[in-house]
Image (cartoon, rainbow, N blue to C red):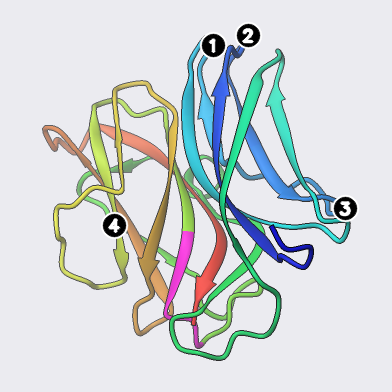
Amino acid sequence: MPANASAVVANLTVTQPTSNGFISAYPTGSSKPNVSNQNYAQNQTIPSLAVVPVGPDGTVTIANSSSGTVQIVADVFGYFLPGTPATSGAFVAVTPKRFLDTRTFRGPVSSAENVPVKVAGVDGIPSSASGVWVNLTVTEPTRFGYFEARAHFATVSFTSNLNFDRGQTIANMAYVPIGQDGKIEIQPLLNPVPRHETTHVIADVFGYTL
């Protein structure tokens, strides 16, 4: 691992948690962001892929947000170098930022709804970005199903970015192309699809592609 690495790609695994909670990974020396890299239930063992910017001292911080304790395993298998990316398709890591939380923004979402999220030109994401890297979290679903994240106004592909069960809180990383209007959209597809079945959606952006 070079000393000047600007970000690392890591698989974060939670094991032996004594209560429900979530972990957040961020560059050491910066404020703890109100974002989740992985949610977990008591006694659950679950991994999640993350891209984490490195702090000035060459380290990252992984924080536990729960009332109990948890064991954390971090397996690093890649890194990014510093500099100003200029090539189309280059990845740029940013400090994680919450762009959507329906628990505080608009209320639960049904299968009949698409949730547009403005990302380009917002909170450090340039208007020229072609896509964003997002940690998607589902919480309080009333029915099992899956999420699809796509460019705004893109055709529904019925592919899954995150599968979930009723009542489950779970997260997954996704790459989402940005629409021409600078937005992405997220749609839960609950099975079956009655309008009264809903879920909450959280989207934390941690990087973008030029």
**Picture disc at residue 42:** 1
Which numbered disc flags the more N-terminal residue, 4 or 3?
Answer: 3
Circle 3: residue type: Gly
**Residue furthest left in the image:** 192
Which numbered disc flags the more N-terminal residue, 2 or 1?
Answer: 2
Distance (Cα) linking label 3 and label 1: 29 Å
Q: How crowded is the residue under tag 3: few (<14 C-alpha within 10 Å), some, or many (20+)?
A: few
Q: Position of residue 40 (x, y in %)?
A: 52, 23
Front residue (pair 107, 43)? 43
Which residue, given by chain and number where applicable, does mark 3 sit on? Answer: 29
**Picture disc at residue 114:** 4
Distance (Cα) linking label 2 and label 1: 5 Å
Pick the quarter of the image with the N terminus.
bottom right
Front residue (pair 165, 17)? 17
**Picture disc at residue 18:** 2
Left or right of 47 on screen, residue 196 = left
Q: Are marks 2 and 1 in contact (CB under 8 Å)?
A: yes
Residue drawn at 20 percent across, 49 percent down:
112
Q: How crowded is the residue under tag 4: few (<14 C-alpha within 10 Å), some, or many (20+)?
A: some
Distance (Cα) linking label 4 and label 3: 37 Å
Which residues, given as a range, are shown in magenta?
128-133
